Image: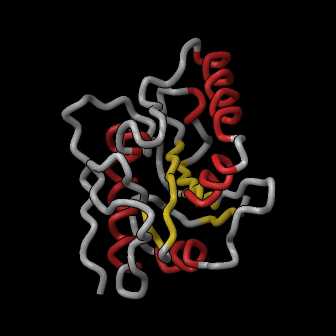
């Protein structure tokens, strides 16, 4: 896990450092291993789930707006957050983003501070290729049941629904609209 401390989720004062970390092409899943880039925001106050979600998408939008000047969208994922093939692209690579924070209703999404964990899609492709994805998914869901009593209703299998609704960890309804807009590459 690579960890970056970035101040307050609600402002972009550390966006350049976050982009540097996410655009680093040396960040690759290790053979038979996993990697995540965890961006910690210790200066963020405790936020409600909906307010956290708003700032999560504000931060992702700002990162995208700066990133698109230098990098094209990863062609392996869709730009439209409504698509079942959506993935957040930064530095030309797709990421599954996991938001964690003290105000999360899901125990597995609680953290002592706001965190955005960026997980490269590439590692999930490796897990599928190696036949390990289903086992890992089962372990994660069993642990969720053990600590919460049931699986997270927002979890869906890749390709069944857009992953965007899962980023913040907040339960959203079918009519939820992701506020993110992928702009054309510069």
Residue in the image at 48% along x and 35% along y? 157
Q: Which colour scheme is used?
A: secondary structure
Q: Is residue 57 above or below residue 24?
A: above
Quarter occupied by residue 52: top left
Question: Residue lying farthest left?
Answer: 175
Give x and y (percent) for residue 179. 24, 53
Residue in the image at 58% along x and 27% along y? 107
Tally of numbered tags: 0
Give x and y (percent) for residue 102. 53, 37
Is 50 left, or right, of 123 in this rendering? left
Quarter occupied by residue 20: bottom right
The answer to whether residue 15 shows anywhere in this view is yes
Is 64 left, or right, of 152 in this rendering? left
* Near-viewer residue (180 or 56): 180
Instruction: Look at the image and tell me in which quarter the N terminus lies.
Output: bottom right
Quarter occupied by residue 33: bottom right
Instruction: Look at the image and tell me in which quarter the C terminus lies.
Output: bottom left
Q: In this view, does 36 lie above or below 49?
A: below
Is 108 left, or right, of 47 in this rendering? right
Question: Residue lying farthest top?
Answer: 149
* Near-viewer residue (152 or 53): 152
Residue in the image at 41% along x and 79% along y? 67
The answer to whether residue 52 shows anywhere in this view is no
Give x and y (percent) for residue 127. 68, 48
Give x and y (percent) for residue 96. 51, 53
Q: Is residue 169 above or below residue 81?
A: above
* Near-viewer residue (69 or 102): 69
Question: Residue lying farthest right?
Answer: 32
Q: In this view, does 81 lie above or below 24?
A: above
Residue in the image at 61% along x and 25% along y? 141
């Amino acid at each position: 896990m690579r960890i970056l401390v970035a101040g307050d989720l609600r402002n972009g004062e550390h966006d350049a450092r976050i982009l540097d970390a996410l655009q680093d092409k040396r960040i690759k899943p290790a053979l038979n291993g996993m990697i995540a880039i965890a961006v910690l925001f210790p200066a963020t106050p405790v936020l409600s789930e909906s307010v956290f979600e708003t700032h999560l998408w504000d931060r992702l939008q700002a990162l995208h707006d700066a990133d698109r000047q230098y990098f094209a969208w990863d062609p392996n994922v869709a730009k439209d957050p409504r698509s079942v093939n959506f993935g957040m692209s930064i530095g030309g690579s797709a990421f599954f983003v996991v938001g964690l924070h003290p105000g999360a209703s899901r125990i597995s999404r609680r953290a002592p501070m706001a965190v955005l964990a960026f997980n490269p899609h590439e590692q999930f492709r490796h897990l599928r290729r190696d036949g390990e994805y289903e086992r890992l998914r089962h372990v994660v869901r069993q642990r969720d049941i053990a600590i919460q009593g049931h699986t997270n209703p927002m979890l869906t299998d890749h390709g069944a629904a857009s992953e965007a609704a899962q980023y913040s960890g907040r339960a959203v309804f079918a009519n939820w609209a992701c506020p993110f807009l992928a702009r054309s590459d510069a």
